[in-house]
């Protein structure tokens, strides 16, 4: 009599197991990358809060409403990265079909050794596969770089300025650079630009945003005035580096306005109306234990004025996130979305169950995300065609759906059988039931 109940418990436990697979809980991390494609905020690589490296690719669905502390992450198992990497740069192609991942500290996932044999990997969104560029990248030889930020212009050229090149992988000692390397995504060629005139100081850990005019705006970071200096120093955040992609010329602008702390490991987003919003970061120190928070955490640079002007929104501290660095920021419609990072206030990694949302229209931190039915110009461009799940993803979805549906149906049948038999036993055991005596 108890067999149906035992089978029901088995099926119930099986459903719980399947649910635990579907409810993905990513590792906390910093120095990762994030891009938005087709209403999905994709997250990958970075340093995690565990002893293991990060290979997973997962996303947050931006087509649905959610509270910023009640998230549903979805794993893309077939999108696992080919190498472990952090402090790399990820740039999205113009048609939103391909992610170009370049540089960073790269670890071979099989040998766990540093491996810089391939400096660029591409992710095909429609097939959810990582690979090295085909055909193989040609042109100039470009060394590995860390702490860089790439941007892409309207012709499909990715610009990568300076950065750090580690020379001693045991002590992580290396050099900063001030060269400009470009990757032509149409011809698959690298070029190190020969630029005359005033070059900026060697620099890394900056932010980079390209204006509609083709001017790249570089803010903050760490620099070294000369190769003989004892250590690196913070770049004065008012000294804005500008690179003209039309003329291949450098210039510098001294920003005015409110007082803003210089910083590293922070983020920036460019709004459609010409404002660059920076958030978070830390001061520079030789060890993480000596890093401290910056003030203010959020500031806005108006690039419509000449010179550019800094301002601190009056409500930017209300419901503000803690002091974090090594996070990412992405602009979707009217919201800047901050993910992961390291909390300088608690000295712990930021929660994987929470993102921070800043409304660029009201200049306020909000706690609820709601997709707009008609994305504003500030949203990430849509791909020309909506990528479909590949065959393995379809099979997984169909299989899980069929399995769960079948398990639920079987559970209902056995529950009905169990209830019926239990009721029949109760009726037979009741003393007031009339029984007809036998003829014997």
Image: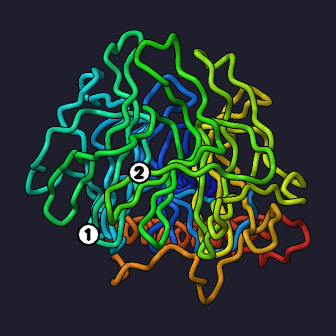
Say which mark, if any, is on residue 6.
none
- Which residue is identified by label 2? 250
Please report the residue visible at 63 percent of the width from the left and 37 percent of the height from the top. Answer: 236
Say whether residue 96 is visible.
Answer: yes
- Look at 40% across and 35% down and name the residue there: 163
On the rendered structure, is 81 left or right of 5? left
Q: Position of residue 391 (x, y in %)?
A: 26, 69
Mark 2 packing: few (<14 Cα in 10 Å), some, or many (20+)? some
Question: In which image quadrant can residue 379 be found?
Answer: bottom right
Image quadrant in which you'd find residue 384:
bottom left
**Along the line of sight, which residue is nearer the eye, 242 or 297?**
242
Side of 280 relative to 40 (left or right): right
- Residue 7, placed above or below residue 419: above
**Residue linked to disc 1:** 391
Q: Position of residue 385 (x, y in %)?
A: 33, 83
Q: Nearer the viewer, residue 280 or 436?
A: 280
Q: Nearer the viewer, mark 1 or mark 2?
A: 2
Q: Position of residue 83 (x, y in %)?
A: 30, 37
Nearer to me, 55 or 33: 33
Q: Residue at x 68, y 68 (%)?
A: 335
């Amino acid at each position: 009599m108890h067999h149906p109940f035992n089978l029901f418990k088995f099926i119930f436990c099986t459903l719980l197991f399947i649910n635990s697979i579907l409810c993905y809980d990513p590792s906390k991390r910093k120095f990762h990358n994030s891009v938005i494609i087709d209403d999905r905020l994709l997250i990958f690589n970075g340093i995690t809060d565990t002893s293991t490296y990060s290979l997973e690719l997962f996303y947050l669905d931006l087509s649905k409403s959610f509270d910023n502390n009640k998230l549903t992450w979805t794993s893309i198992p077939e999108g696992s990265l080919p190498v472990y990497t952090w402090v790399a740069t990820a740039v999205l192609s113009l048609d939103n079909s391909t992610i170009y991942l370049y540089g960073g500290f790269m670890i071979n996932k099989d040998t766990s050794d540093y491996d810089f044999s391939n400096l660029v990997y591409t992710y095909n969104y429609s097939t959810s596969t990582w690979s090295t560029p085909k055909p193989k990248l040609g042109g100039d030889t470009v060394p590995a770089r860390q702490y860089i930020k790439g941007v892409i212009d309207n012709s499909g050229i990715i610009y990568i300025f300076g950065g750090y090149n580690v020379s001693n992988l045991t002590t992580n000692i290396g050099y900063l650079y001030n060269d400009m390397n470009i990757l032509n995504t149409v011809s698959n060629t690298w070029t190190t630009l020969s630029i005359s005139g005033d070059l900026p100081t060697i620099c890394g850990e900056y932010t980079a945003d390209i204006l509609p005019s083709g001017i790249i705006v570089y803010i903050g970071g760490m620099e070294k005035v000369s190769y003989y200096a004892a250590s690196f120093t913070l770049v004065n955040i008012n000294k804005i580096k500008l690179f003209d992609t039309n003329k291949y010329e450098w210039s510098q602008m001294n920003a005015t306005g409110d007082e803003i702390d210089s910083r590293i490991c922070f983020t920036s987003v460019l709004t459609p109306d010409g404002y660059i919003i920076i958030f978070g970061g830390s001061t520079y120190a030789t060890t993480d234990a000596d890093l401290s928070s910056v003030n203010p955490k959020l500031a806005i640079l108006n690039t419509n004025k000449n010179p550019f002007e800094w301002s601190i929104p009056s409500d930017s501290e209300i419901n503000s996130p803690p002091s974090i660095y090594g996070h990412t920021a992405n602009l979707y419609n009217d919201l800047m979305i901050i993910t992961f990072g390291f909390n300088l206030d608690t000295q712990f990694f930021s929660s994987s169950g929470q993102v921070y949302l800043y409304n660029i229209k009201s200049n306020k931190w909000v706690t609820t995300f709601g997709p707009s039915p008609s994305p504003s110009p500030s949203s990430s461009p849509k791909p020309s065609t909506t990528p479909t799940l590949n065959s393995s993803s379809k099979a997984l979805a169909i299989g899980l759906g069929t399995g769960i549906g079948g398990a639920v149906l079987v559970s209902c049948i056995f529950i009905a059988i169990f209830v019926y038999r239990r009721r029949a036993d109760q009726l037979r055991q009741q003393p007031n039931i009339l029984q007809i005596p036998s003829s014997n």
